[in-house]
Image (tube, grey):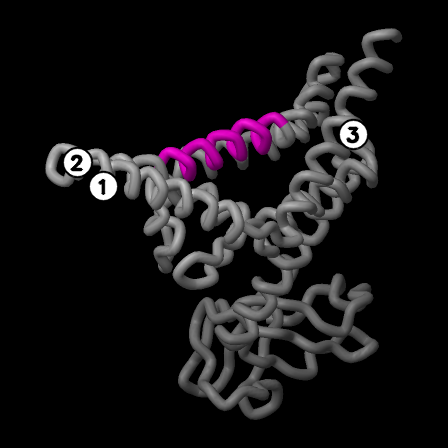
Amino acid sequence: MQPSSAAATISATTQRGRILSYQPSGQGTVSAAGVQYPFEIATHWRSELAPSINALVELQFDTAGALTSVSLVSTQQRTQEEVSEAARLAREKGQKIWGTAVDALGIRVLAAIGVLMAGAFVFNTLGLRLFATVSRSYWQLLGISADSLESFARTGASSFSAAQFFFLLAIAACFATMASGHPKAALGKCAPLLFVVIHTGLLFVQIKTAVNQAGEAMNGMRSVLGDRAAQMADQMASEMLGQVWQGLSFGIGFYLVIASSIVLAAYGYGEYKRKSIV
């Protein structure tokens, strides 16, 4: 079988195709772009492995369109090409999403969201110096319970908590204007600040409650040792609470989270007012 005259019009010197047939005599046929080409293993084959039917091959042509070589496309090469193609598609998709986000939110809002996430996930937010110095990022704080000082100092990964879920939901609310043009959608940018205020208040209340519970446990000695022991227990609880407050320190993550949340809330409220007037 002779190559079709369409081969003479091939502009590219390389094409991909598949082996349609191969004879023990060393002759076979490959197909590329709907055109069949005969090849001989002694003349055209350039791979170490023998040809096999339906194998993916790379064909090279001279300037006249005549087949000059046939090479097997290895599995590793195909995998690399697929990974490169997936990366290219992901990059294009990411650029498209980024462009949409910039158009809907603006660079300043996206920068504030980036600072918020860096402050929450990367930098330490709160440190406690009591028996030992322990620092936690804001995301880690959301994953632990403040019911006891021991839980704050405990190391190891914690399970995904409801507080972490609502924090992610608050971040997602900042993108509400990408899905809705309603003026109130802009108020979604206020969600991180609202969440931080509520969670911080609850956190300090829980810490204070944990210390008070320790004092109440000591106060239980009243019935055994009398009023003198109760006074000592109250004094110890007060001193313990003072040590906890003195041992608390705020890291850069705290200030980044607070500042970015305030900035986002200001942008959101300002956008809401502008859209409401229009």
Q: Position of residue 142 (x, y in %)?
A: 46, 41
Residue behind mark 1: 229
Spatial CA span between label 3 and label 1: 65 Å
Residue positioned 71% across, 72% down in the render: 14
> Are the residues at dot 1 and dot 2 in contact (C-beta closer than 8 Å)?
yes
Residue behind mark 3: 104
Element class at badge 3: helix
Spatial CA span between label 3 and label 2: 68 Å
Q: Count the marks: how many? A: 3
Q: Earlier in the sequence, mark 3 or mark 2?
A: 3
Q: Amino acid at mark 3?
A: Ala
Q: Earlier in the sequence, mark 3 or mark 1?
A: 3
Element class at badge 1: helix
Query: Looking at the image, can residue 137 be seen?
Result: no
Q: Residue furthest top?
A: 277
Spatial CA span between label 1 and label 2: 6 Å
Which tag is nearer the camera, tag 3 or tag 2?
Answer: 2
* Residues shaded magenta: 194-210
Q: Nearer the viewer, residue 134 or 220?
A: 220
Which tag is nearer the camera, tag 3 or tag 1?
Answer: 1
Q: Residue furthest left?
A: 224
Q: Which picture quadrant has residue 161?
A: top left
Q: Is residue 208 magenta?
A: yes
* 275 up-or-down from 39: above or below: above
Q: Quadrant of the N terminus?
A: bottom right
Give the numbered dot on residue 226. 2
Q: Which picture quadrant has residue 72?
A: bottom right
Q: Position of residue 221 (x, y in %)?
A: 17, 39
* 37 up-or-down from 242: above or below: below
Residue positioned 58% across, 33% down in the render: 196
Q: Position of residue 216 (x, y in %)?
A: 27, 35
Q: Which picture quadrant has residue 84?
A: bottom right
